[in-house]
Amino acid sequence: MTETQMDAADAAAGSAYWKRNLAISLTGSFTTIVAMTLLLPFLPLYVAELGVSEHAATVQWSGIAYGATFFAAALVAPLWGRLGDIYGRKLMLVRASLGMTIAISLMGMAENVWQLVALRLFVGLAGGYASGSMVLVATQTPKDRSAWALGVLSSGIMAGNLVGPLIGGALPPIIGIRGTFLAAGGVIFLAFLATTFLLKEEKSPARRQAAKASGGWPAIPDKGPVVAMLATGLLLMLANMSIEPIITVYVAQLVEDQGRVTMTAGIVMSATALGSILSASRLGKLADRIGHWPVIAGALAVAALLLIPQAFVTNSWQLIALRFLMGIALGGLLPCITAVIRHSVPDSAAGSILGYSISTQYVGQVAGPVLGGFVGGHIGMRAVFLGTCVLLLAGAAYAWMVRPREKTS
């Protein structure tokens, strides 16, 4: 049996521990994402507490501190994926959870804003638990259950993004900002213990040798589907984030009581995440049954069409409903993207390429708000919705054109 055939057989069978690993990865990803996002509501307050007094400087440093984590994570995701291919994916999760335990706990002891930014950079460099979990689950789950399992994991990650700011708003008045960081570090330490002692990864000396010899981009036999998925991941995050800078201003035009603007804007932002949480595992299960490519192209097309009426809504509840429906459509994309990449590359290169996928998603997460803010400010807010619609339709057409004609995934 050739190496490619052995790899295909392993992917079809999966690990004997895949259900246990999914549960641990889901719990660990949720807790680490909560810890990364809980500082959103109080970050400007903490920056001011660290000695930054001017309003403009406070806003600027808050943006730098928040973005530092994602900037650093985008740079190192392929490296951690590559090392995971060689030394094991469990080791990467142990490293990430321990690194985040230390960094987030130290944030509660920062004495100036430079230390806070440095620790946020360190979280991005040393972290990556959620992305590492995606790699582990993708490579250890039976092929016919992979999109469902990745959908469950994606729901946990998105739930962490939703719950984190809520906890960040509730805890500081009770235990203080510094106490909140220490509590978050303690929770991640529990994830570190569970990962270290409960998660089981079957060793593969053959994969390790193959990863050392030829892992990474050169090992991919057909690069077309992988390139399509990297582009789709970027589009997914760009579509999610391009509207973020203008939501509050857009809602202000729709709401008569200006005192309700921020609350309504928060609901609008959360509606997309809630829709994705509810649909991710279901669309993943559908993709396991009918194939990943029809779900990817269909989800992009439906999301694109839902953007058109968003540009012409007349009240906030219409916008909330449409963003919720858009979240349902986009919810299945992340598990399908990961599953297609997993089934398109040899096991020895899976971590490296999924690391590139994480990086492109971070690029979309950074580029989306920048482009959305620029277009909204210079052309108009409707242009943001309609421009994103065009990009998603182009992505849907591209995914449909490059899909493998034979049913392989």
Image (tube, grey):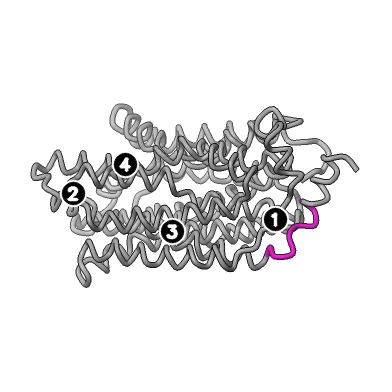
Residue under label 1, please give it: 140
Residue under label 3, please give it: 32
Displayed quadrant of residue 169: bottom left
Displayed quadrant of residue 175: bottom left
Whether residue 350 appears in magenta in the rendering, the answer is no
Q: Is residue 362 left or right of residue 56?
A: right
Q: Residue at x 31, y 47 (%)?
A: 119
Circle 2: is it few (<14), some (14-19), or many (20+) Cα within 10 Å? many
Whether residue 17 appears in magenta in the rendering, the answer is yes
**Residue 180 rendering spot, x and y as whole percentages:** 27, 64
Tag of residue 47: 2
Q: CA distance from mark 4 to mark 3?
A: 28 Å
Q: Is residue 401 visible?
A: no
Q: Are marks 4 and 3 in contact (CB under 8 Å)?
A: no
Q: CA distance from mark 1 to mark 2?
A: 42 Å
- Element on which disc 3 rests: helix
Mark toward the start of the polypeptide (4 vs 3): 3
Instruction: Tell me the quarter of the image containing the N terminus.
Output: top right
Report the magenta residues as a range.
11-18
**Residue 336 rendering spot, x and y as whole percentages:** 64, 48
Q: CA distance from mark 2 to mark 4?
A: 24 Å
Amino acid type of disc 4? Answer: Ile
Residue under label 4, please give it: 246
